[in-house]
Amino acid sequence: MTGPNSQEIRVAGRGRVLTASLGIAEPTTVEGEWPTGWKDLGYTTTDGVKLAHKDKIDPIDTWQSISAARLVHSDRDVTFKFQLLQINEDTLPFFHGGGEVKSDGAISGIYTYAMASNPRLEERMLGVEFTDGSDVVYRLVVARGQVTETTELSLVRNAPVKLGVTFTALAAGPDTPLVTFIMKDPSFAVA
């Protein structure tokens, strides 16, 4: 429907962020649980998830004209920014770019995580889900991407430790979308 319609205003009242290894089955519906292999990264700050979509368009200038003769797309950048509040065997390696938490079998309850001295590319899948009431559900799926930026950790006595990340979508193939939106939303009326 065109024109003002307050029923089409969306508020991401509740949501979650998930991750999976490359190649795990993607959800095809908003009903039920995510496919096996997806891990919920837990609590995030009240800022939720910020999705940025930036295209770089370069002008082609000519000698004969002051204005551009043509515009070409030279870059597309899709990022998700969020801050995780839980620290565990899934979130710590996600934040630091890979690796794994290991248990010291000799000492119960002691774990180690070794941040690599040589960074490596840790590509993953990303899922974001949010609901607006009981009738609206959105799932956003990135088939391939990686954490490209992290925020500094503040270790203070009066605030939680926040694992702030920027996750950048990467091309998974020439015919694969950067982000797939799966929606249950009565606002859409396409045939």
Image: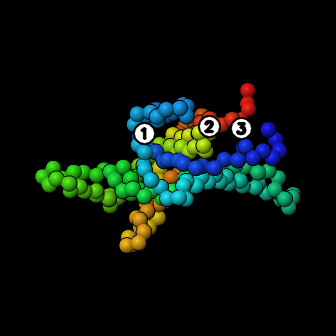
**Furthest residue to the front?**
134
- The residue positioned 38% from the left and 53% from the top of the image is 91
User: Left of 74 or right of it: where is 61?
Assistant: right
Amino acid, disc 2: Asp
Q: Residues within 10 Å of mark 3 (few under 14, many from 20)?
A: few
Amino acid type at circle 3 is Ser
Instruction: State the residue position of label 3.
Output: 187
First in sequence, mark 1 or 3: give its number: 1
Instruction: Look at the numbered disc 2 and give the secondary structure of its residue.
Output: loop
**Label 2 Cα crowd, 10 Å radius (few <14 / some 14-19 / many 20+):** few
Q: Are marks 1 and 2 in contact (CB under 8 Å)?
A: no
Q: Is 121 positioned to the left or the right of 76 in the image? A: left
**CA distance separating discs 2 and 3:** 11 Å
Secondary structure at badge 1 equals loop
Q: Which of the two marks, 1 or 2, is nearer to us in this view?
A: 2
* First of labels 1, 2 by sequence position: 1
Image quadrant holding the N terminus, namely: top right
From the viewer's perspective, tell me whether residue 140 is left or right of residue 33.
right
Going from N to C along the chain, the mark reached first, 2 or 3, is 2
- What residue would you read off at disc 2? 135
Mark in the foreground, 2 or 3: 2
> Are discs 1 and 3 less than 8 Å apart at CB?
no
